Image: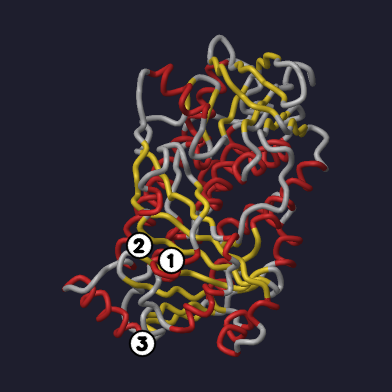
Amino acid sequence: MARETTFEIAIVGAGMGGLASALALAKAGHTKITVYEMASDLGFVGAGIQLAPNMARILDQLGCWKKIADEAVQCADTSIREGSTNKELGHVDLGYVEKTYGYPHMVGHRSSLAGSMYEACQKEKGVTFKFRSTISNVKFVPKPSFKVTPRDGDPYIVECDILLGCDGVKSNTRVAMLQELEETADVVDSGQAAYRIMLTRDQMKNDPELLALIEADTVTRWIGEKRHIIAYPISNKQIYNISTAQPDTNFAEAPSATYTTRGSKSAMMQVYGDYCPMIHRMLDLVPEGEVCEWKLRVHSPLSTWVYGSMALVGDACHPTLPHLAQGAAQAIEDAAVLGVTLSPKRIADRKTESINKALKVYEKVRKQRAEALVELAAENGRSMHLGAGKAKEERDKIFAALKTGKGPVPDKWADADVQRMIYGHDCVAEAEKACQEEGLSAKL
């Protein structure tokens, strides 16, 4: 009986979606999960990341939240400021978040999040990692299959029962699926790029204004025309994480496939040249050779995330701009729902039709929500990047009203109604409900 219900699950990509999917499926009872990753290891990569309650709830259920929380910083409040003057436009106390949703809004390091999920996966006997492995030649019938090319070995073919494409915005599995369906999903040039900067406490300690930033439990956003900076302390306040968004003019001559370019410190200082002196001092702490700029890329919505026994996850199907800080959280929600719909007992007959039905329930639960948040993130960026004119005047009136405790927050990330929609959503409960509605009952 055990042999009959053992599924070969292949996960392409060990990013947030891949790690969370492997862990959720292992917790659901699957015992043969292999994760294929191009990189040599996870490494100490990335920068800061916001750890919202909807993410924390899932990670707690998966048993890996405590270590992440221990290394993170709890956000007491957020301050939205005018970049040119440092004048506070709006302030929101975030103390109610934990009382309302059971978890506080926290910020941490991406390596802490990924590392904790990876450690949790390593404790599961059913999860195996294949690093230094490139995937190509994806096929979908009669079962999913693909070629694995190890960096230090001979290529081989893998056939599996279920294939999950968790390989990011440049997903090869998405490309293969769309080719099979004779469809396209155009890359959408957002026109935006980002600097991601991490300053140490030691770098900031001799400037009282900057030291006050890393000492505070505050997420600060400085906004201006077509650009903004968002920053917060991480790693027990030993690092100050800074992320920007601005026009991607530095990519004008770069190949279309390029997502990262070595940046120029003088160009960065010029982009924020009309920001206040404190911002200049902060950015000037970045060593010349450590300025990198990322192109913020998305693609047009897909008609489907599922084909046969294969499904896309995370940035492979719903890449987003960072203006709601929900990219990783939405990939982790995907994983949690897959843990429900692909429960071994729900697909125990092993039929391709049953697996496809389970994946279609996953798509039904996740697609509309994830795509709505993608659009809301883009809308929030447009609102925060307004230049002089009537729209900006109206936005700033709303900010002014906020100081008296009235009305919505123009920065949707900090708006209570938007937070209710995002943080108050229980994707696991929604998935269980959808399984019942679609007749995808656990077979005992």
Query: Is disc 3 in contact with disc 2, using a CB cutoff of under 8 Å?
Result: no
Q: Earlier in the sequence, mark 3 or mark 2?
A: 2
Outermost top residue: 142
Outermost left residue: 390
Residue 354 shown left or right of residue 23 in the figure: left
217 vs 33, nearest the viewer: 217
Location of residue 89 with respect to 387 vertically, above or below: below
Q: Residue 177 carries which label?
A: none
Specify whether residue 209 is in view: yes
Q: Mark 3 points at which residue?
A: 403
Location of residue 171 with respect to 254 vertically, above or below: above
Q: Which amino acid does label 1 sit on?
A: Trp
Location of residue 64 with respect to 432 vertically, above or below: below
Specify whether residue 436 is in view: no
Spatial CA distance of label 1 from label 3 is 17 Å
Instruction: Give residue 95's position: percent from left, percent from top.
Output: 55, 79
Q: Which amino acid does label 2 sit on?
A: Asn
Which quarter of the rendering shows the C terminus? top right
1 vs 233, nearest the viewer: 233
| Residue pictured at 61% horizontal, 17% vertical | 146
Query: Is disc 1 in contact with disc 2, using a CB cutoff of under 8 Å?
Result: yes
Q: Name the residue under label 2.
A: 380
Numbered disc 2: secondary structure: helix
| Residue pictured at 38% horizontal, 39% vertical | 299
Q: Mark 1 points at which residue?
A: 413
Instruction: Give residue 279's position: percent from left, percent from top.
Output: 47, 78
